[in-house]
Amino acid sequence: MIAALTTAGSAIANSRALQIAIIGALFIVLFLLWLKGRDDQIRKMERMIGERQARLKQDHIRKENAKKSKQVADARESAPRGITNADELRDTDLGWIVSDN
């Protein structure tokens, strides 16, 4: 094992092309690791932006629903009272409302 390492070390020390190739490979690996970290940061920021937009949209929908619920409650309160069942209508009125024509 030590002999193989010594032989590899000697080959690296004596070969300028091998040294440049190793440095180039290390540079490429480090650059790819930096790109991966940068990509992770960008994805995290995009996810945070999407979550914020979703929360804002949810708030907007809640406000609209509350407004509509209030309108429905107001409409129910102001709805005309009187006849609560179709049996209470006169036959002529019932015939006019529910007709086969």
Image (tube, helix red, strand yellow):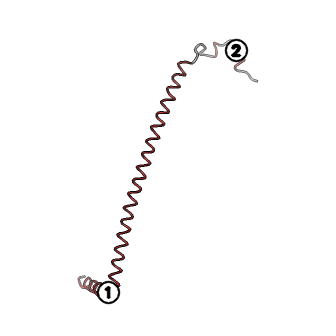
Compared to residue 17, the image places residue 42 above or below, namely above
Disc 1 to disc 2, how far (Cα)?
A: 107 Å
Position of the N terminus by quadrant: bottom left
Instruction: Name which residue lies at 69% across and 16% down.
Output: 94
- The residue under label 2 is 93
Compared to residue 83, the image places residue 12 above or below, namely below
Q: Please tell me which residue lies in front, 58 or 85.
A: 58
* Crowd class of label 2 (few under 14; some 14 to 19; many from 20; radius 10 Å): few
- The residue under label 1 is 15
Instruction: Name which residue lies at 39% across and 64% down.
Output: 35
Farthest residue, direction right: 101
Q: Position of residue 14 (x, y in %)?
A: 29, 87
Query: Residue 5 — which label?
Result: none
Position of the C terminus by quadrant: top right
Q: Position of residue 12 (x, y in %)?
A: 30, 84
Farthest residue, direction left: 2
Choose top left, top right, bottom left or bottom right for residue 90. Answer: top right
Compared to residue 44, the image places residue 78 above or below, namely above
Q: Is residue 96 left or right of residue 30?
A: right
Q: Position of residue 69 (x, y in %)?
A: 50, 28
Q: Please tell me which residue lies in front, 47 or 81.
A: 47
Mark 1: amino acid: Ser
Q: Is residue 83 left or right of residue 26?
A: right
Instruction: Name which residue lies at 33% across and 77% down.
Output: 23
Q: Tag 1's secondary structure?
A: loop
Which of labels 1 and 2 is toward the front?
1
Q: Position of residue 93 (x, y in %)?
A: 70, 14
- Of callouts 1 and 2, which one flags the residue occurring earlier in the amino acid sequence? 1
Mark 2: amino acid: Asp
* Crowd class of label 1 (few under 14; some 14 to 19; many from 20; radius 10 Å): few
Q: Tag 2's secondary structure?
A: helix
